[in-house]
Image: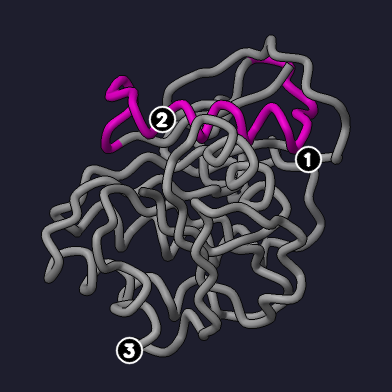
């Protein structure tokens, strides 16, 4: 029973989860944006910065998936402490979040993250800094977390074949589609290979 904060990847994860008959609870500000009608889908209108809304969305949940975009705000880093606290209070252990390749380890500067090194091609580091805060919070929590870290993320098609690397971006990786990122993230609900790890994903 995943609980989702929905971005582009999150919407695709919802589709995969419903296809496999999971019960899915989604917390969204504007329910009208969810164009899916399914008896296994519960949509809760609320705000990820409201502790009560988060607690409400977590009743009866096994796994939390957070796929929130940064969108030029600090919502990502502000909501994560509330999610961690609610999960710890509810006894929910497993969380899968969608991060960014910027918070993977740099190959050129081993003690730095990619966004802090010349390896990153991004001009702005603002989004990566938000994801870095979330990474630090999850590391300090008691949760079984996995951060899926895609590089450039076009909508694209589902290819079904991609490379993954623990804590690093696969060598020479330049992009990964939204459907493939969602598929890998969804598979982590049942997998335990990448507990307490960042995972780089690219073609």
The part of the chain drawn in magenta is: 171-196
Question: In this rendering, would 166 be left or right of 122?
Answer: left
The residue carrying pointer 1 sits among few (fewer than 14), some (14 to 19) or many (20 or more) residues within 10 Å by Cα, namely: some
Which is more N-terminal, label 2 or label 3? Answer: 3
Secondary structure of the residue carrying numbered label 2: loop
Residue occupying image coordinates x 19% and y 58%: 141
Residue occupying image coordinates x 36% and y 48%: 1
Please determine whether, in this image, residue 32 is positioned above or below residue 65. below
Which is more N-terminal, label 3 or label 1? Answer: 3
Question: In this rendering, would 170 be left or right of 86?
Answer: right
Q: Which residue lies furthest to the front in this view?
A: 39
Pick the residue in front: 116 or 94: 94
Q: Residue 52: give its label.
A: 3
The residue carrying pointer 2 sits among few (fewer than 14), some (14 to 19) or many (20 or more) residues within 10 Å by Cα, namely: many
x, y percentage for residue 13?
59, 42
Q: Which residue lies furthest to the top in this view?
A: 161
Q: Residue 188: give its label.
A: 2
**Is 176 within the magenta?**
yes
x, y percentage for residue 58?
30, 67
**Residue position for label 1:** 153
The residue carrying pointer 3 sits among few (fewer than 14), some (14 to 19) or many (20 or more) residues within 10 Å by Cα, namely: few
Residue occupying image coordinates x 54% and y 48%: 98
Asked whether disc 1 touches disc 3, contact meaning CB atoms under 8 Å apart, the reply is no
Closer to the camera: disc 3 or disc 2? 3
Question: In this rendering, would 58 be left or right of 76?
Answer: left
Quadrant showing the C terminus: top right
Q: Residue 62: give its label.
A: none
Please determine whether, in this image, residue 171 is positioned above or below residue 180. above
Distance in Å between CA atoms under marks 1 and 2? 19 Å
Which is more N-terminal, label 2 or label 1? Answer: 1
Residue occupying image coordinates x 31% and y 20%: 193
x, y percentage for residue 24?
46, 53
């Amino acid at each position: 029973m995943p609980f989702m904060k929905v971005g582009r990847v999150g919407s695709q994860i919802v589709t995969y989860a419903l296809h496999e008959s999971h019960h899915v609870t989604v917390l969204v500000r504007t329910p009208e944006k969810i164009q899916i009608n399914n008896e296994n889908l519960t949509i809760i209108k609320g705000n990820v910065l409201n502790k009560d809304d988060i607690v409400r969305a977590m009743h009866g949940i096994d796994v939390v998936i957070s796929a929130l975009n940064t969108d030029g705000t600090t919502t990502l880093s502000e909501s994560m402490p509330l999610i961690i606290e609610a999960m710890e209070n509810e006894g929910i252990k497993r969380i899968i979040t969608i991060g960014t390749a910027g918070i993977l380890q740099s190959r050129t500067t081993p003690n730095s993250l990619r966004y802090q090194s010349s390896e990153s091609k991004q001009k702005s580091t603002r989004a990566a800094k938000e994801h870095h805060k979330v990474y630090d919070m999850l590391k300090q929590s008691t949760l079984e977390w996995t951060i899926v870290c895609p590089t450039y993320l076009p909508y694209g098609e589902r290819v079904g074949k991609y490379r993954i690397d623990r804590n690093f971006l696969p060598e020479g990786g330049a992009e990964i589609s939204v459907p493939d990122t969602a598929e890998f993230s969804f598979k982590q609900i049942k997998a335990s290979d990448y507990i307490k790890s960042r995972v780089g994903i690219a073609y």
